[in-house]
Amino acid sequence: MPLSSLDDGATDEQLMEAYVDGDDGAFRLLFERYAPILLRLTRRHLRDEELAQEIVQQTFFRLHGARNDFRQGSKLRPWIMTIAMNLVREHWRRKKRRQTADLEVDTQASPEPELTPMELQQRSELLYVALGKLPASQREVVELHWFQERPYAEIAQIVGTSEGAVRVRAHRAYATLKQLLVSEIRGDE
């Protein structure tokens, strides 16, 4: 019986092994699991819905093309996330410059206890601007750790470095973000 005909309780790795063995239904289940995750990740890096969707499609094309290279016993999540992040990096390398938006910043002295939707949007934009000022290697670690809630060990696999180096990048990034956000709120820049 094909693995994909079982309930959705199969692990990612079991589904990948079934797909490598020719079970197309396993690929559909993997797509259903990972497409939304990858779309959120690429959207944050690209800030372009159509381009993010294209990168997700390319990720699955690459997964299909490299399915026989998947090592049995390996974790699928870091592997597929690495494919997606490599495609995002390739996009930025080709583009050779980042698009930045001039965003207005809310500089009220003290926020109200409950924030309005506009205030939440302004804070989100402020954070986005500050993230854009970080070096790419630090920004990537923050996005994977903070927004994707990935453990440092998994991030190290995705970015291709040691866990210690990832922790250092994260520490430096959070310290820089704090300084940037305080400066922006005070209007120092």
Image (cartoon, rainbow, N blue to C red):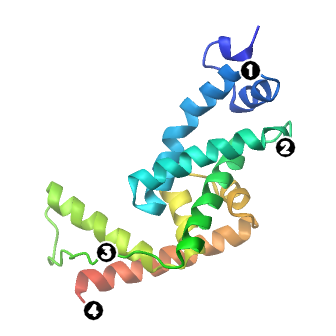
Label 1, label 2: how far apart the Cα atoms are: 16 Å
- Which of disc 4 and disc 3 is earlier in sequence? 3
The percent coordinates of residue 121 (x first, y second) are 23, 61
Q: Where is mark 4, residue-wise?
A: 188
Check disc 1 and report its element: helix, strand or loop: loop
Question: Which quadrant is the N terminus positioned in?
Answer: top right
169 up-or-down from 7: above or below: below
- Which of disc 2 and disc 1 is earlier in sequence? 1
Q: Where is mark 1, residue-wise?
A: 23
Label 4, label 1: how far apart the Cα atoms are: 58 Å
Asked whether disc 4 touches disc 2, contact meaning CB atoms under 8 Å apart, the reply is no
Check disc 4 and report its element: helix, strand or loop: loop
The percent coordinates of residue 187 (x first, y second) are 23, 88
81 up-or-down from 31: above or below: below
Q: State which mark lies toward you, 4 or 1.
A: 1
Q: State which mark lies toward you, 3 or 4.
A: 3
Judge by depth and name the residue closer to the eye, 166 or 93: 93
Identify residue type, mark 2: Asp
- Which of disc 1 and disc 4 is earlier in sequence? 1
Left or right position of 173 against 162:
left
